[in-house]
Image (cartoon, coloured by chain):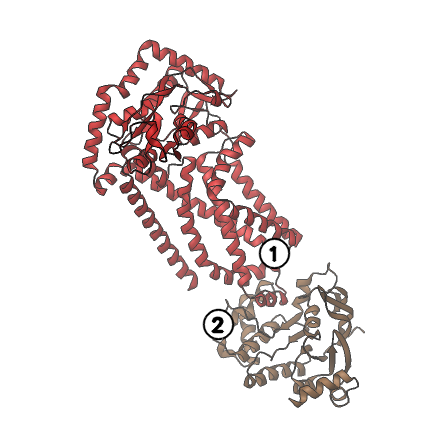
């Protein structure tokens, strides 16, 4: 019995070790990972080819070219981008981030590259003219932004409530639908949005003027910071800086964007238009979702079956290990687990985990724990007389388990397996939180660009249903084969 | 003494606070058929299940065929190959055919090739009168048929000793005869058998010795005629009166 248990332990440890060794940090020749927002036009946004453009993007790319280093852009959303720098998952963040004393405690900032203040925007239909009209109303802001800080600092004085969202488009939508009376955001962003047909109007003068800076984790990546400052100075000198600013904020730029927005609206008012226009982005989103699903199902099934078996071998210690693992990973919310693995572990160990790998580990642990629970339950549901009869003939535990008990247990487990596969597919959507460009995140980004929330989410929902239908049919087919 | 197949010394078995066996001494000679009788809860089945260590004894010594199976160093799987067991609820392997049920252990444990095991399964099914059920699944059999297959399955390992744990208790009355007939045949062929049963007719006819248990102890034992006709102990008398008058 001890040998067998040791074997199980070794297998589990080996599997875990294999997992973690897979993403030993690979230091290529100076490629820096730069976190940024999903949508913060005109500083950061995805154009219709899903390529990230905007003032921040052009600046960092030009500076990288100027100074001779490589960058990899990670559109994580503002809050996640900021967190991933502080946990060391990314090297720097450029996302229209205002330099504040509070942030200086965690980050080292570059020289400022833009100046902006906070303004309030409302729906043109609403009668709200200023801060004094907000009493008893709700105000939308984006998590972790200066706008949010400002709103919170004056909410008592003006008697409003603050609602926070992770993406700008959700903030704007909440105001447009009338759920929130107003929103606070950077003047450059809101003015740009108003000019390009966002459908809101700005009603206050900029306050809390602040400067935008590129940031790295305090005390780290200092050479990157130096290069940024040097490059920025060069761009300012040779006129490239002004060119970029003009390109995104000048009258020509905004009116052409507005036109194209209007044109796009007319064109993509239909579902088919939207799909056509975004088919590449949607296609790669589906592919990423499928990759995550298939790999997670495979790893979670292996992990779950091992842990489940550990729970039924006649050894108190092994059973205890199995119970504890199931308890922990079934008990943790998937979202928390994903953030913990992606942001928490790297700040503890200092080595990065790619988002995709972190996502697979998250799903493997969570779905694996559920799998382990029903594997254990399925085996225990087989009449104990079957095991006794097999053992009474002289068959060792392993043979009795594999020839008699498991084949009967698996039949009991099959419906649970199918159920778990479907849940795994759905749960991949949660991984959008760590910036994996799967179907849900793709949907978020498309909406960030065209603000067609209802239609895009409908398309995404239908795609999920289609994928789940295919997976269900496939599973039922396998089930029939097993039962024959 | 070399002829002793089963030698149990001072066997104690507790389930928590429940003292099921309170120091049992029990012997079975080669070729002997011993029937264990007694009221339910007296520990008969537990004693039987200790003999192939389906239950781990709390203390005491169990020697089967010269091997101390109460010693944790003894390879229990090897010892069990020599001890056939038949269960009250048959416990046929539901995922296997009748033939596979019988042939599984000999092939898996390297006692026979697939062909030999299949051949042997056929012969065993002939002896229990079920050769037409060769390819059937257990769920299609009646209780009596299941129990006869279970006996064939146990015999396939060519054991020296057969343990029967209330083999007819779960059967409809009209099925009991077929199963008992197979057991009688086995006894005649000289198989060493320990049988827990409420079939007093079988005990009288087939047993070499009857052991009466009550309250986790052996209360009385002897030849069937002695125990059944001249019981010495009051508890034996009370029990037999109840059973035989039913």
Residue for badge 2: B137
x, y percent for residue A214:
42, 20
Tell me where residue A414 sits by quadrant: bottom left
| Front: mark 1 or 2 | 1
Q: Nearer the viewer, residue A97 or A380?
A: A97
Q: Nearer the viewer, residue B188 or A324?
A: A324
x, y percent for residue A261:
22, 31
Among the chains pictured, the one given red colouring is: A
Residue for badge 1: A313
Question: How many residues crowd mark 2 within 10 Å: few (<14), some (14–19), many (20+)?
Answer: some
- From what the image shows, is residue B190 above or below residue A13? below
Q: Colour of chain B?
A: brown
Tag 1's secondary structure? loop
Q: Answer whether residue A478 is visible to the viewer in this image.
A: yes
x, y percent for residue A389:
60, 68
Left or right of B216 in this view: A65: left
- From what the image shows, is residue A87 above or below residue A429? above
Left or right of A475 in this view: A252: left
x, y percent for residue B77:
66, 63
Tag 2's secondary structure? loop
Q: Residue at x 48, y 72 (%)?
A: B137
């Amino acid at each position: 019995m001890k040998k067998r248990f040791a074997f199980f332990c070794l297998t589990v440890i080996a599997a875990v070790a294999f997992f973690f060794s897979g993403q030993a940090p690979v230091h290529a020749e100076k490629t820096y990972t730069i976190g940024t927002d999903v949508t913060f036009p005109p500083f950061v946004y995805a154009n219709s080819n899903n390529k990230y453009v905007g003032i921040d993007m052009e600046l960092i790319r030009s500076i990288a070219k100027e100074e001779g280093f490589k960058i990899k852009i990670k559109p994580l959303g503002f809050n996640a981008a900021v967190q991933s720098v502080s946990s060391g998952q990314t090297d720097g963040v450029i996302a229209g981030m205002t330099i504040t004393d509070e942030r200086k405690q965690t980050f080292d900032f570059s020289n400022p590259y833009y100046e902006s203040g906070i303004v309030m925007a409302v729906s043109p239909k609403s009668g709200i003219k200023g801060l004094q009209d907000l009493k008893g109303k709700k105000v939308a802001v984006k998590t972790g932004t200066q706008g949010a800080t400002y709103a919170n600092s004056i909410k008592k004085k003006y008697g409003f409530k603050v609602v926070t969202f992770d993406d700008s488009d959700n903030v704007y939508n909440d105001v447009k639908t009338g759920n929130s009376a107003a929103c606070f955001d950077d003047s450059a962003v809101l003015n740009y949005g108003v000019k390009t047909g966002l459908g809101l109007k700005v009603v206050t003068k900029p306050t809390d003027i602040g400067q935008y800076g590129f940031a790295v984790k305090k005390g780290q990546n200092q050479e990157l910071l130096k290069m940024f400052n040097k490059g920025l100075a060069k761009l300012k000198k040779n006129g490239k800086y002004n060119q970029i600013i003009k390109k995104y904020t000048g009258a020509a730029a905004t009116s052409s964007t507005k036109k194209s927005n209007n044109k796009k609206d007319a064109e993509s008012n239909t579902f088919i238009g939207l799909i056509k226009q975004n088919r590449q982005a949607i296609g790669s989103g589906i592919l990423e979702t499928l990759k995550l699903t298939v790999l997670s199902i495979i790893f979670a099934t292996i992990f779950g079956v091992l842990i489940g078996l550990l729970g039924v071998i006649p050894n108190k210690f092994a059973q205890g290990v199995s119970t504890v693992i199931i308890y922990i990973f079934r008990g943790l919310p998937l979202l928390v687990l994903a953030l913990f693995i992606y942001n928490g572990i790297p700040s503890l160990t200092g080595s990065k985990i790619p988002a995709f790998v972190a996502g697979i580990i998250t799903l493997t642990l969570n779905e694996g724990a559920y799998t382990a629970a029903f594997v254990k339950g399925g085996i225990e549901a087989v009449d104990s007389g079957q095991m006794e009869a097999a053992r009474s003939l002289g068959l060792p535990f392993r043979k009795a388990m594999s020839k008699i008990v498991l084949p009967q247990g698996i039949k009991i487990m099959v419906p649970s397996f199918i159920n778990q596969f479907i849940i795994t597919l759905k749960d991949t959507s949660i991984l959008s939180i760590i910036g994996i460009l799967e179907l849900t995140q793709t949907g978020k980004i498309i909406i960030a660009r065209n603000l067609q929330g209802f239609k895009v989410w409908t398309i995404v929902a239908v795609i999920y249903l289609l994928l789940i239908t295919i997976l269900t049919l496939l599973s039922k087919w396998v089930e029939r084969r097993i039962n024959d | 003494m070399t002829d002793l197949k089963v030698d149990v010394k001072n066997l104690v078995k507790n389930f928590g606070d429940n003292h099921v066996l309170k120091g049992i001494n029990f012997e079975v000679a080669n070729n002997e058929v011993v029937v264990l009788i007694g009221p339910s809860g007296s520990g008969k089945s537990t004693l039987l299940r200790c003999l192939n260590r389906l239950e781990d004894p709390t203390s005491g010594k169990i020697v089967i065929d010269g091997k101390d199976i109460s010693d944790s160093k003894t390879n229990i799987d090897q010892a069990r190959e020599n001890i056939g067991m038949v269960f009250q609820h048959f416990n046929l392997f539901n995922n296997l055919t009748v033939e596979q049920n019988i042939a599984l252990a000999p092939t898996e444990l390297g006692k026979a090739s697939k062909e030999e095991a299949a051949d042997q399964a056929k012969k065993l099914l002939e002896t229990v009168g079920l050769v037409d059920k060769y390819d059937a699944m257990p769920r299609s059999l009646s209780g009596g048929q299941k129990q006869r297959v279970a006996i064939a399955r146990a015999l396939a390992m060519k054991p020296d000793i057969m343990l029967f744990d209330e083999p007819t208790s779960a059967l409809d009355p009209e099925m009991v005869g077929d199963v008992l007939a197979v057991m009688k045949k086995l006894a005649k062929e000289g198989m060493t058998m320990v049988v827990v049963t409420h079939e007093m007719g079988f005990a009288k006819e087939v047993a070499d010795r009857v052991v009466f248990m009550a309250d986790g102890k052996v209360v009385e034992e002897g030849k069937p005629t002695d125990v059944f006709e001249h019981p010495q102990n009051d508890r034996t008398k009370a029990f037999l009166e109840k059973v035989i008058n039913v």
